[in-house]
Amino acid sequence: MSALALAIIILLPGIVGVAFTLSGDRMPRAVVPIALGVATITAALAVAVAFARPEIRFPFIAGAPAGLAVDGLAAFILPTVSIVTLLVLIFAAAEGVRAASRFHGLMLIFASAVAITVTSTTLPTLLFAWEIMGAASWALVGFAWREDSRVSAGLTAFITTRTGDLGLYLAAGAAIVGGSGLAFADLPDAATPWRNVIAAGILVAALGKAAQLPFSWWLSRAMAGPSPVSALLHSAAMVAMGGYLLLRVAPLLEATGWASTVTAWVGAITALALGAVAVAQRDLKQLLAASTSAQLGFVVLAAGVGSVSGGMTFLMAHAATKALLFLAAGAWLTALGTKRLSALRGVARRWPIVGVTFTVGILSLAGLAPLSLWAAKDELLAGALEISPALYIVGLAGAALSAAYSGKALFIVWRRVPADSETGYDTEQSGTRHVAGWTALPLVTLAVAAAVLGILALPPLAGSVGRILGGPSSAVPGILELAGSAVLVLAVLALVFWKGAPEPRWALNWLGLEQLTEALVLTPTVALSRALARFDDEILDRSIMISAQGVARGARSLTRFDTKGVDGTVEGLATQSRRLGRLARRPQTGKVHQYYAQITIVIGVLFILILVVR
Amino acid sequence: MLSLILFLPLLGCLVLAALPRISDAAARWSWLAITLLDLALVVVVWIGYRDPGKNALAFEERIDWIPNVGSSYRLGVDGISLPLVALTSLTFVACAIFALKERTRPKAQAALFLFLQTASLGVFLSQDLILFFVFFDLSIVGMYFVIAGWGHGEATRSALKFFLYTFLGSLALLVGFIGLYLGSSPRTFDMVELAKNPPFRDNPLVGGLILAAVFIGLAIKTPTFPFHTWLPSAHTDAPAVGSVVLAAILLKMGTYGFVRIAMPLLPDAWRQWAWLILVIGIISVLYGALVALAQTNLKRMIAYTSVNHMGYVIVAIGAAGVISTSAEQARDVAIAGAVVQMVSHGLITGALFLLAGVLWNRREDYGITAYGGLAGVAPRFSGLFVVAGFASLGLPGFSGFIAEFQVFTGSIGSVPWSAIALPGILITAAMFLLAMQKMLLGKTRGLSTGLRDLDATEVLAIAPLLILSVVIGVFPRLLLDVIEPAAAAVSTLVSR
């Protein structure tokens, strides 16, 4: 029964989504109600299966069955993602989208793929959904397909994340050689060195999806997509799935010895570097995107240090927080036609509901006590402290940067509205100067979640997530650490309020990662492909054509030899024979006296011959 | 039953040829009817098919043919040939539907394609080397006339290039077959007998030479690097339905030959040279993908993706031959993946070439950049192209993913350095997305302006191929239940 519920969670949005996407805009009125209905059913069932914990296994390829299950990890994240999906769709419906059928269709396909990703217990099922998420993100980021730059952004997102996905193919192959089978639970048992290959492959795939270094830049480009898309893909779902996957395979990372250390450090450094990038941004969505990379860095760090429950709590808190912030940014973008921070001065005063909920979200992002990300971050940092003080300090520095960029955005939107505010609007699109009333529902819901989800990491509930997840209990932050980080955040906020945030130029351009990728990967690949294409036409094909022509030439000279040589000889022989024949006919005149004369001559010649020979 | 499936199209061909006064419409529709009937018969066989076990065939038929050289008319199917027989029948139905609007000599075209269908089916049904070779050559002859008679551009030249090149390949193949015959005892051309008792087991030199002849013959047909250069020109100048048959069916004859003939009949030589075959496969994958990326002509681009996609097959069967390092499970998975890839590539590339044909019918231009923003004027065309493109780049949910996942897990599982081929799927993805972006998205421009969208006939020809690809992609067991036992049998034959 509960397995049926899980199947519905996956199949219903999948099938409806495909139908919507293919149908075009044939039923414009029905699309939104149906999509919301599907999302509601899915969300309700997601909550239900979180308790029922169904498991499905089915045959896939020889000797490697595929499986889906709601285990402890999925029990937390599946409802989170489903509810965020529903709220985002409500927001989109409230604002109204063009090409509603395609939009909702793609969002539902995406939701279905996320549900599979979350519940996968084996590599093939994960990879299946993982790449569909990527393709859906291509279509959603490039949703406004008439604009080339947006389509290119989708392409960047898909190709960059697929680069990481190659790691999953590699991991699957290595799992077969390593003899562990393709189930996540069995991967740590793979024989060395294959266990290392598996871990490395999964790590690369997860880092790509989670927009960690060095892949982060695709997320910047992906901001060309509609805001509701960012609110789902770049907060709760796709990017978060990278972190989620690492939490799921934390035992494997641990088993290799090195992979968990690498993971932790990549996460910590991303939190720090992309935090700096976020501080430098002048565009609200770019700031939020960089902060997504940075915040996911904390989740990756958590996976590296084995603080699965801390990472889990953080992932949920971040999903609510960041979805909220992207939706608020989207509401302003729709209303004012801009996402430039300089043009958003005082915008919170103009639409108080959006302003207040945005404030809750951005303060949670800052890590302000007692909002959700504060407690969650401290829990995972406590895990880091157990492993290495250096990691803890880098993480703490990342936390300080969170406060800095959050403060930057917060203080801008609450400034006094400048008199010439209109001049800064409509840079992206023409704004409606209106925020739809129904957008309040998702905004307020998410704000409440962003505020309170942290209680999962605080007494008396502290440790409950870990107990539900099972496995070893992870570190719990002490009072000193909680208070210390709270003070740190307040201090940074005060500093930013007082002095303003620095805008390091080197960080504005996302560390130049895009240019670096272009120079190191794209340009050489394109040059190689052109060179090979020329080689193919001008050398390979031509050499075969030339040798074919050589054969033809050879054939022609053979023909010449044949006509003049062989045939000529034969013809010549024939001619000579004919001449001999004519010659032989001449004596045969039919006249008896001539025959006698010939005989006389022949006898005479014979007589002389005999005389001579003797 | 198999003989009926095999000769029904030929019968249709003869009837069409014998009735010169039949109208064009009647010829087109009777062509479609015959292909549909043939497909229905194949479906019946599929439903009745039970795995015959190792070294055995289902629906077997055998009549003595040339007994003094041990050659018989022997037909049969197993889990490797049956999917390809089904693919052949389906592809010809799609061609018949697409050609319902053909204006150039429709009667002759119908007859020729029916002839070509028998030749193609014969290759996959034959269980005797001579019979195989006869059908193999007839298919080349048929395709020559398709390109020369209905092609465009430098059709005669391309047709001749195609014919001479692939015919050269088939001569190499014949040399190999005669070698196999001479090495067998008792002497026979029977594939099943030869597989039971493979020749040259204790003579690696001769075995290797025979394999070289067979390999070159099949590699030209597949085609693998460096024998592929006939393919782009043949495709570019072939009519749409010709390209479909060429890509979906004729290329498979090469890869099918590897699995059916080269691997089980020359197991020792195959194992000895498997690393080289793997290397050729890896080069084909990467080279095909990279050269495809640089193409500006849609058909040439798809042609080079065929080199890439067939490269996966070669990678898989090469890796499956490297016994020393591999696990049995990995080898089975790799060979099954190779067979799935054949079916998958046939479906997807068939659809892509039909779509390219639509552009030619409308605008006589394959230039990718000549179009732009097609999605605005031709949403059905663009939708199907996007679906076909994603299917071809191996997106999960389509058959290509099932194939490539098996090929890679199986190959890496057998020979870890097969992973060098992995970037192939990345380059193909970039290539298709770029092509879609240039042709379909952005503002409507160039030749796109006013382009008529697909009509019902065209959708009916193209969509079923893609739907089947989705069905395999979502329910792979439907196909794998047939393929896997046969793939495992080949795996044991090659590793004995």
Image: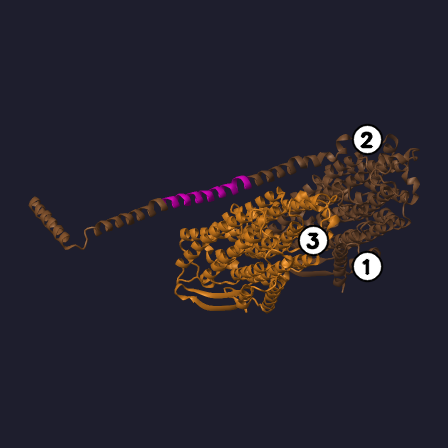
- Residue found 29% across the figure and 50% down from its top: A574
Amino acid type, callout 2 = Pro
Image location (x, y in percent) of residue A553: 43, 43
Total tally of numbered discs in the picture: 3
Amino acid type, callout 1 = Ile
Nearer to me, A162 or B301: B301
Badge 2 marks a residue whose secondary structure is loop
Image location (x, y in percent) of residue B371: 69, 45
Question: Marks 2 and 1: in contact by CB < 8 Å?
Answer: no
- Label 1 chain ID: A
The span from disc 1 to disc 3 (Cα, nearest Å) is 31 Å
Q: Which chain is brown?
A: A
Image location (x, y in percent) of residue B211: 45, 52
Q: Residues within 10 Å of mark 1 (few under 14, many from 20)?
A: some
Position of residue B483 relative to residue B376, above or below, is below
Which stretch is magenta?
A535-561
Q: Is residue A35 left or right of residue A544?
A: right
Badge 1 marks a residue whose secondary structure is helix
Front disc: 1 or 3: 3
Q: Residues within 10 Å of mark 3 (few under 14, many from 20)?
A: many
Q: Which label belongs to residue A502?
A: 2
Provide the residue designation for mark 3: B384
- Residue found 78% across the figure and 59% down from its top: A49
Write down the quadrant of residue B78 in the picture.
bottom right
Here the colouring is: by chain
